[in-house]
Structures are given as structure tokens and as C-alpha cells.
Image: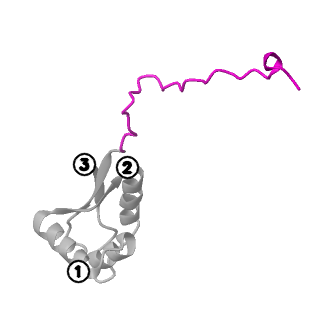
Amino acid sequence: MPSAASATPVADPVEPVAAPGATPRSRPRRQPRYHVVLWNDEDHTYEYVIAMLKQLFSHPAERGFQLAKEVDRKGKAIVLTTTKEHAELKRDQIHAFGADARLARSKGAMSASIEAE
């Protein structure tokens, strides 16, 4: 039987090392949020706006109609608030949506931009 003196040594416990500048109560920082803003023009119908918002943002027709009225009345409307990368994608999808087939004068998609929250 081995003696206590010949037993395998046990290492001292290692203290966890905090990241530089971290405090015990540090939490992950939330990504900044961005609004996707849809701008008014006279080359797109309410039906176009409602259909686009349903297809690109999954807004129900009622919400699409409310946003279409806001764009018409105020000149712009926030259609989504999200991360910067997602906002850029949605803005680009609006720009790629194409002309309104209901209006002969419609030559392209609506305008959209992103703004920091």
C-alpha cells in the first residue's frame, strides 16, 4: 500500500482571469439599432406598398395600410428597427423590389434609407 508521502500531487486551483477592462458585473453590449425608413413618392400605389411590406417584412395587410398612410401623410415611415446589417439588407430589398405595375409613370422601386435609433 503506498504511503501518503508518495501519493500523486494535486495542483493548486487556478483562478479565472477576467478580460482586460471587464468588471464582475460586465454584460455583453447590445448592438446598436437602426430604423429602415420608407420615403414617400407619387409613383407607387397603396396596394404596391402594402404588397411590398407583406412580402419583405411579413407585415399583415392592415399594418401595411397603416404604414402606407403614414408615408403618404408624413413623407416617411419607419417600417422596421433592427441591427445595422439586417437594416441594410431590408433597405436593399426595398430598392430591388421594382416598379409599380399599376402606374405607368412608375419607373423603379421606392426609396428607403437607414437611420440610427
Kindly report the distance in space between the C-alpha atoms of the residues bearing marks 1 and 2. 27 Å
| 13 in magenta | yes
Q: Which residue is mark 3?
A: 117
- Amino acid carrying label 3: it is Glu
Foreground residue among 17 and 20: 17
* Left or right of 70, for residue 97: right
Name the N-terminal-most of marks 2 and 3.
2
**Label 2: few (<14), some (14–19) or many (≥20) C-alpha neighbours in 10 Å:** some
Residue 26 pos. (x, y %): 38, 33
Q: Which residue is mark 1?
A: 62
> At 75% from the left edge and 20% from the top edge, which residue is drawn?
9
Amino acid at pointer 1: Glu
Nearer to me, 81 or 30: 30
Query: Which residue: 29% across, 59% down?
Result: 112
How many angstroms separate mark 3 from mark 1 (CA)?
A: 25 Å
Q: Which mark is residue 39?
A: none
Q: Which residue is mark 2?
A: 84
Q: Amino acid at mark 2?
A: Lys
Mark found first going from the N terminus, 3 or 1: 1
The answer to whether the residue labelled 2 contacts the one labelled 3, judged by CB atoms less than 8 Å apart, is no
User: Where is residue 16 drawn, in percent x and y?
Assistant: 54, 27
Give the quarter of the image for residue 1. Answer: top right
Identify the secondary structure beneath mark 2: helix
Residue 59 painted magenta: no
Residue occupying image coordinates x 20% and y 65%: 40
| Residue 114 appears in the figure | yes
Secondary structure found at label 1: helix
Q: Which residues are magenta?
A: 1-30
Left or right? Give the position of 14 relative to 80: right
Q: Is residue 49 above or below residue 23?
A: below
